[in-house]
Amino acid sequence: RKMPERPMRVFVTGASGYLGQFLLDALLLASRANDFISAGTYSTIPDGIAEGAQKIPLDLRNKASISSALTSFQPDVVINLAALSSPAVCEKQREEAAEINCPRLLVEEMRQACPSALLIQLSTDQVFAGAAGPEGYREGDATGPVNQYGATKAAFEELIRRDWPEHYILRSSLIYGPKPPRPCGRSGTFLQFLDDSLGEAGRAGTAVSLFEDEMRCPIHVDDCVAVIVALIDAHRRQVCSTPGDVPAPEGRTVHLGGPDRLSRVDMGRAVCRVRGYSESAIRPTARAQAEMGFR
């Protein structure tokens, strides 16, 4: 195929969110080499979008909003990071969670506006029931979500596999890293929560309840960004090359997790060691016994 005459156009939904801000910054840095032109969408926080990227308002529940955004930008790659990501909120607002986390309208409008675009979907380890044991889950294992958040994400995975062959599904575990560089719907990650709450508990002589029986594989935000950028770059090189010159990455579903299998208690102890807090500020608690309104 002939080398494209313009940079690859990358459209990031949820770009004002935590991962979206770091991803958009990385894409803007790469755009200096004329590789990418980036657009970031937002729902309520336009100031979360970095200067240098096109800022596009987007409502994933509104057909006209999606059509306008895609038609005006004409993306080569669509990265869907937008989500209602709180499991507790998803249980209370089940219909809204289904519309946002399984955005059928997005795929429908992509067929009209950018039918050959690559779709990269950020999914979650919560598409699984969490009963695999120390061996964990592999990409080909059957899903079995136990809450509405996981169910909506699993539903969109299936829709993408059925209706959009040119895709990658990235199942992320707990993402941690520094505070976001711009205004965001949350002030940080579970790491910042641990730092703040354990420090305060240590000073007050109290303790923070942390789960000891829920295991995750936390991944740094920079590693998530690196994987996404690598997939975009591989796609760009395929588009720019003669067919067969650049092999496609193996597998369309990829698990994004760090090297360590940790409970919330393990994470809290790590923060205590680094920050010099007393581990007496941690109260180990069984997740299975917690009344949270979701599983």
Image: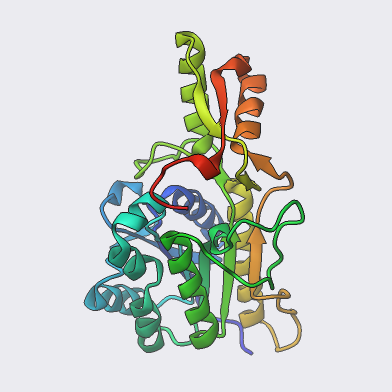
Instruction: Residue at 63% x, 71% y: name it.
Output: 253
- 257 or 3, nearer to the observer: 257
Residue 166 is left or right of residue 54, and the answer is: right
Which of the 4 quarters of the picture holds residue 211? top right
Q: Position of residue 167 (x, y in %)?
A: 56, 77
Rendered residue at 49%/24% (across/down): 208
Number of numbered discs visible in the structure rendering: 0
Is residue 83 in view? yes
Judged from this view, the residue extending furthest toward the front is: 289
Coloured how?
rainbow
Reply above or below: 291 against 69: above
Q: Is residue 180 left or right of residue 142?
A: left
User: Can residue 11 be seen here?
Assistant: no
Query: Percent x, y for residue 60?
Result: 31, 69
Image quarter for residue 270? top right
Comparing 106 with 230, the one in front is 106
Left or right, 206 with reference to 261:
left
Left or right: residue 236 versus residue 87 is right
Q: Nearer the viewer, residue 46 or 264?
A: 264
Identify which residue is drawn at 63% across, 39% down.
263
The image shows residue 179, relative to residue 116, as above or below, that is above
Instruction: Examine the rendered structure and indicate whether residue 85 appears above or below residue 207.
Output: below
| Quarter of the N terminus within the rendering | bottom right
* Residue 224: x %, y % from top left: 60, 54
